[in-house]
Image (tube, rainbow, N blue to C red):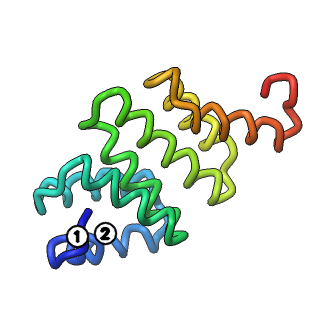
């Protein structure tokens, strides 16, 4: 998502939900707002990457899950990977595992998802499963 007035307003309207920490509820709110502002799934996916690079994992998680609904399988894999990475960064290993599995299901050749999923399992002491 290119930083512009539309993007800034979208993020400002989403901020109170993010601050409450109810991320799954924020996915619905973000989807509604993205539709209202005409922000595409590809823009949301790109923004989820940027938010992750900026350490804004709550936004990474929410934007990735909004984007996933409108993307093809390779895009879905990237979005689920971003959600898994964000969940892992936020300390929720179970949620991270769920999203990494969805990324792999969407695109079995998506190496980053396999890598992070295996590393997560190893970190959890599940080396055989990793």
Q: Is residue 44 left or right of residue 125?
A: left
Residue 33, picture quadrant: bottom left
Toward the viewer: 102 or 30? 102
Residue at 64 percent of width and 36 percent of height = 97
Q: Is residue 120 above or below residue 22?
A: above
Q: Position of residue 93 (x, y in %)?
A: 69, 45
Q: Position of residue 65 (x, y in %)?
A: 39, 46
Toward the viewer: 43 or 28? 43
In space, the residues marked 2 and 1 are separated at their CA atoms by: 6 Å
Residue 27 marker: none
User: Which of the image's four quarters has the C terminus?
Assistant: top right
Residue under circle 1? 10
Residue at 28 percent of width and 77 percent of height = 12
Residue at 54 percent of width and 70 percent of height = 55
Question: Disc 1 on helix, strand or loop?
Answer: helix
Q: Residues within 10 Å of mark 2 (few under 14, many from 20)?
A: some
Q: Position of residue 103 (x, y in %)?
A: 50, 31
Question: Disc 2 on helix, strand or loop?
Answer: helix
Q: Residues within 10 Å of mark 1 (few under 14, many from 20)?
A: some
Which is in the foreground here, disc 2 or disc 1? Answer: 1
Q: Is residue 116 left or right of residue 85?
A: right
Residue 14 marker: 2
Q: Is residue 127 above or below residue 31?
A: above
User: Which of the image's four quarters has the N terminus?
Assistant: bottom left
Q: Is residue 120 above or below residue 16?
A: above
Residues under numbered marks 2 and 1 in contact, where contact means CB atoms less than 8 Å apart: yes
């Amino acid at each position: 998502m290119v930083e512009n007035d539309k993007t800034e307003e979208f993020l400002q309207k989403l901020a109170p939900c993010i601050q409450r920490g109810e991320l799954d509820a924020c996915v619905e709110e973000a989807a509604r707002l993205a539709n209202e502002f005409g922000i595409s799934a590809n823009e949301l996916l790109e923004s989820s990457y940027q938010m992750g690079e900026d350490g804004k994992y709550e936004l990474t998680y929410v934007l990735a899950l909004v984007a996933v609904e409108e993307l093809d399988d390779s895009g879905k894999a990237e979005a689920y990977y971003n959600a898994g990475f964000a969940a892992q960064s936020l300390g929720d290993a179970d949620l991270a595992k769920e999203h990494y599995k969805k990324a792999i299901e969407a695109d079995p050749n998506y190496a980053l998802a396999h890598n992070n999923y295996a590393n997560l399992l190893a970190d959890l002491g599940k080396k055989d499963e990793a």
